[in-house]
Amino acid sequence: MKPVLLIDFGSTYTKLTAVDVDSEQILGTAAAYTTVQTDINDGLNKGLAILRQKTGDIEFSECYACSSAAGGLRMVTSGLVPELTSEAARLASLGAGAKVVGVYSFQLTEDDIEDIKETKPDIFLLVGGTDGGNTECILHNAKMLAEMKPSFPIVIAGNRSCARQCQRLLEGCEVYVCENVMPKFGVLNITPTQKKIREIFLNRIVLAKGLSKITSLLSDIMMPTPSAVLQAMNLLAQGCDEETGIGDLVAVDVGGATTDIYSIADGMPKAANTVYKGLPEPFSKRTVEGDIGMRYSINGIVEATSIQRVSEISGLSVSRAEELIKYLSENTDKVPENDGDDLRKLDFALASLAVETAVMRHAGTMEETYTMMGLTYVQAGKDLSGVKQVILTGGSIIHSPDAADIARSALYSPMHPMSLRPKEADIWVDRKYILAAMGLLSVHYPGAALRIMKKELEKNGYSKQENL
């Protein structure tokens, strides 16, 4: 027996998962309120006490952790063109597990600098220009940042022709230089920047958020929670040397404040009469919808869809739905109490619409156009229509008896015919909330992590979207 403890310090809950890597079994899971405002060890110790009631008094051989506590890894980026270098910077940040709280394009203004000061990011990503291209914008932005004397580290990942000049302009600041996130027009190179962001998170941000108190317990790794989930999704899709994966997938993590979407797929056009428009997207992609959540961002779901659709899907009257939405926005810890509860019906509708909206924003779109060659299709973003696996997780969803039905909202619907969402797929539900833990475990035990996921994720059969 080789027990390993895996910890996820969330914004609300600290989740613990105990695994025996020899038998590839989950020994137990537990959760307690995250106490980052006082001493993060308080919440951890409560969680450990709950876990010991299930596992007994185990001495763990190794311990690994991830965290999104205290606001997660908050990043601001600036680039040249919104659709190109700025978008490349955003994709690099999201793929590193960050929460992007500001994206700026072109030259920073004095008002932008004031906004950045108020935002207080953990890291600033400065990009702009292809290698050998425009230098004026990134140099201007480096000067503007230098004048504000930032307390946060700055990662420079723009035009290599002036990267060192930007570094000299920022002398006295904490600065790191990486390869250009877009060295050539339309070419992404985000892996080196993501690696540097994670290093900074480990070496600096962990200390800033008070998480250094638990580093003596850890064997090796601390990473942002979304980065751990993305690592788990890559492993589940692609497999490892000793175990095959399940293939391309889309994963949806619906939280109280945000909804994260992950896709592991190429997503490029397959048909000869389809052309691609815009910046090619990474094979492993993560997006975050900050206005879509089951409690703190409950009104964002209604604003993105309509109260009429909430009423239609839930079976509640518009007035009753509005009454309950107002109640939940003021009582964010409230959960449905029984199967006949109006709150359960409302939660089903809200979750279905959250999944539908977030996946539509993540997936690409198709447009018809006519050229000299006849009818042509123009694709923007990822084509996920051929993806055959959909994974659903998130504390507000996984305990719902309707989770599989909610997951079907990620699939193609005639209501939105130009959205390139999966047409039909197997539905998997992360009932034990283990994906972040398996991402951590996979760093040293990929085969065990993959086999545990295959065994523990609840498979609900092959599904096609019904028109909600």
Image (cartoon, helix red, strand yellow):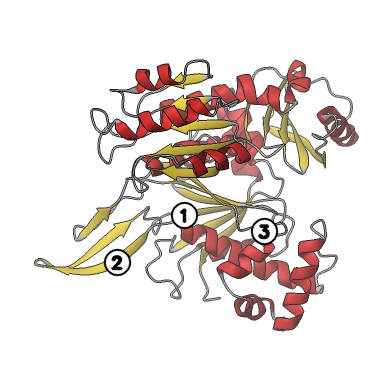
Figure check: 346 above or below 142: below
Tell me how far mark 2 sits from mark 3, CA to CA: 31 Å
C-beta proximity under 8 Å, tags 1 and 3: no
Tell me, for residue 362, which label it has, or none: 1
Name the residue rendered at 37%, 42% in the picture.
Answer: 106
Tell me, for residue 392, which label it has, or none: none
Q: Which tag, 2 or 3, sits closer to the chain's start?
A: 3
Q: Please indicate whether residue 429 sits to the left or right of residue 426 in the image.
A: right
Q: Which tag, 1 or 2, sits closer to the chain's start?
A: 1
Q: Which residue is mark 2?
A: 367
Q: Of discs 1 and 3, which sits in the foreground?
A: 3
Q: Farthest residue to the left: give it.
A: 372
Tell me how far mark 1 sits from mark 3, CA to CA: 18 Å
Residue neighbourhood size for the residue with mark 2, other residues' Cα within 10 Å, grouped as few (<14), some (14–19), many (≥20): few
Under circle 1, the secondary element is: helix
Q: Is residue 256 visible?
A: yes
Q: Which residue is mark 3?
A: 297
Name the residue rendered at 63%, 21% in the picture.
Answer: 204
Three-letter residue code for mark 1: His
Three-letter residue code for mark 2: Glu
Under circle 3, the secondary element is: loop
Residue neighbourhood size for the residue with mark 3, other residues' Cα within 10 Å, grouped as few (<14), some (14–19), many (≥20): many
Report the front residue among 224 and 462: 224
